[in-house]
Image (spheres, grey):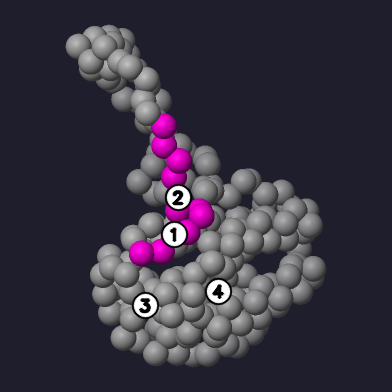
Amino acid sequence: MTSTLITTRPADVAGELHRARERTLALLAPIPDPDQRRQVSELMSPLCWDLAHIAHYEELWLLRALSDVAPTNDAYDDLYDAFKHPRRERPSLPILDPDGARAFAADVRARTLDLLDRIDLHASDPLLHDAFVYGMVIQHEHQHDETLLATIQLMGDFAHPAATIATTAPPAVDHVATVAVPGGAYSVGTSDSPWAYDNERPEHPVVVAPFVIDR
């Protein structure tokens, strides 16, 4: 999921924050707390680490970067920094349990919304202009929702409704048939979208030679 481009109306910003959090909590709700604490693969974090990381990121950018507030806990700057600890290490860290992660996330969100009522979203500050920093945090949470879902899908012994993908038989296809795709110059990437990754910048032309592909 990705964030829709929010406007500078505080109510819209709050609505997008709520939509992201609703999705996060809905993904976690059916999972017993012990399964949220365990690591199902060295490739993934415990689910409760992801939730607390989402909350810590929000605290960093929507509270501490925008106002003079102290961190909830100085240790979180280390525990929930994705660059400091590879995923295989995270279960051994003194991270918050599921109850603690939920409480931390709820507390940060309440303070975020309180501050939002007093923030000037038309300020010249690059973080606030067009509510940029809010969109960044919303998109970050949506990205972690995809990470949560990937982790849940690796829990082969747990049937989660959001991880169940309905499949249907593919239509009959003449597998010897091919399709000719015309070549040409195409514009890829972006120079102005605020929600693109750095490796998608800048917008640039690419010339593609004609090719044939199997259907």
Which residue is label 2 attached to? Answer: 164
Which residue is label 1 attached to? Answer: 159
User: Is residue 159 located in the magenta-colored stretch of the structure?
Assistant: yes
Q: Position of residue 141 (x, y in %)?
A: 53, 61
Amino acid residing under circle 1: Ala
For residue 151, the mark is none
Label whose residue precedes the other's in the sequence (1 or 4)? 4
Q: What predominant SS class does the magenta segment belong to?
A: loop
Out of 159 and 49, give the one closest to the viewer.
159
Amino acid residing under circle 4: Ala
Query: As displayed, is residue 38 above or below residue 133?
Result: below
Cα distance between the residues tagged 1 and 4: 26 Å
Cα distance between the residues tagged 4 and 2: 27 Å
Label whose residue precedes the other's in the sequence (2 or 3)? 3
Within 10 angstroms of label 2, few (less than 14), some, or many (20 or more) residues? few
Amino acid residing under circle 3: Arg
Left or right relative to 213: residue 55? right
Which one is in front in this view, the residue at disc 3 or the one at disc 1? 1
Label whose residue precedes the other's in the sequence (1 or 2)? 1
Q: Position of residue 45 (x, y in %)?
A: 36, 71
Q: Position of residue 92 (x, y in %)?
A: 31, 86
User: Is residue 172 located in the magenta-colored stretch of the structure?
Assistant: no
